[in-house]
Amino acid sequence: MIYLNGDFMPIEEARIPVLDRGFIFGDGVYEVIPVYSRKPFRLAEHLLRLQHSLDGIRLSNPHSDKKWSELLEQIIAGNESDDQSLYLHVTRGVARREHAFPKGVMPTVFIMSNPLLAPPEELLATGVAAITANDNRWLRCDIKAISLLPNVLLRQMATDVGAIETVLLREGFMTEGAASNIFVIKEGILLAPPKNHLMLPGITYDVVLELAAANEIPHEVREVSEYEVRTAEEILLTSSTKEIMPITRLDDKPVGDGKPGTMFTLLHQLYQNYKSTVMRGNANVSAF
Ligand code: PMP
């Protein structure tokens, strides 16, 4: 069951007009929210980031947080899996094709759910391969825009060579992955690039840094150079759907000793513990 502009329906029945500005211009923003045991994870943070993205494209939020939560609850209830990945999408609506914003147009609001599958144990045991590429995206990567063509092309470069992610480098520094945030471990210290216009402020990125702080894991939020990426002891990828994964090959060379390292093992365990605490309802999802 999906939600489209006020109605719930099976996805096969959902239709939008071809003049939707999402279709014509990619003029919209989105969110992906993981749901564990039918509870959305870090909902408040995802809704805050949605607001940031909407502000970034100068589109007013069609719903209050309360209304969003109600709609999401209905979608969760209307879908089979206990663990789901909620996708919500807002565009500037339907109007004659003209770049400037149309007046008096209702935004298009779409929500769907897919089963959320944890990364397979085998992949976590061996780690995954990634490549690097020049980050040729625009300078507002903090907006979770539906216009993802650069990300699509960058991710496909990885897929073409059997890797799972593309680590992006801009002017000698790492920004993030094509669809994930990236952490680097150097001399035992967890390094994270600072949140700015060059990367998406990942919700999982925040969880990892909070876990590091709460557990006295040495960490620094600062620019990470290409050299540090290429000589890292470990590289980690994070996202709401992939959680934390170890990158053990980069550009066909082993990262460190080519096996998932101790920082991965520790953070993965802490993340699983934190998740299960949240799922049991003993923790406020908004505050660690
Ligand atoms: N960066 C990009 C470009 C992404 O698309 C994503 C999400 N797929 C992330 C980072 C990770 O963000 P989150 O942890 O909120 O899923």
Image: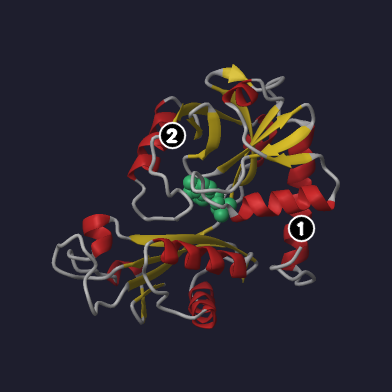
Where residue 210 appears, as percent x and y from the top left, is 74, 53
- Cβ(mark 1) to ligand 1 < 8 Å? no
Relative height, residue 146 to residue 174 (above, below): below
Q: Which residue is mark 2?
A: 135
> Who's the residue at 76% across and 44% down the image?
267
Q: Earlier in the sequence, mark 1 or mark 2?
A: 2
Q: From this viewpoint, is residue 240 visible? A: no
Res 61 quadrant in image: bottom left
191 or 84, nearer to the observer: 191
> Coloring scheme of the render?
secondary structure
Left or right: 197 as drawn, with respect to 269: left
Q: Residue placed farthest to the right in the image?
A: 216
271 or 54, nearer to the observer: 54
Tag 1 secondary structure: helix
> Who's the residue at 76% across and 58% down the image?
274
Q: Residue placed farthest to the left in the image?
A: 96
Left or right: 236 as drawn, with respect to 32: right
274 or 65, nearer to the observer: 65
Frontmost of labels 1 and 2 is 2
Q: Which residue is mark 1?
A: 274
Relative height, residue 175 to residue 286 (above, below): above
> Who's the residue at 42% across and 61% down the image?
56
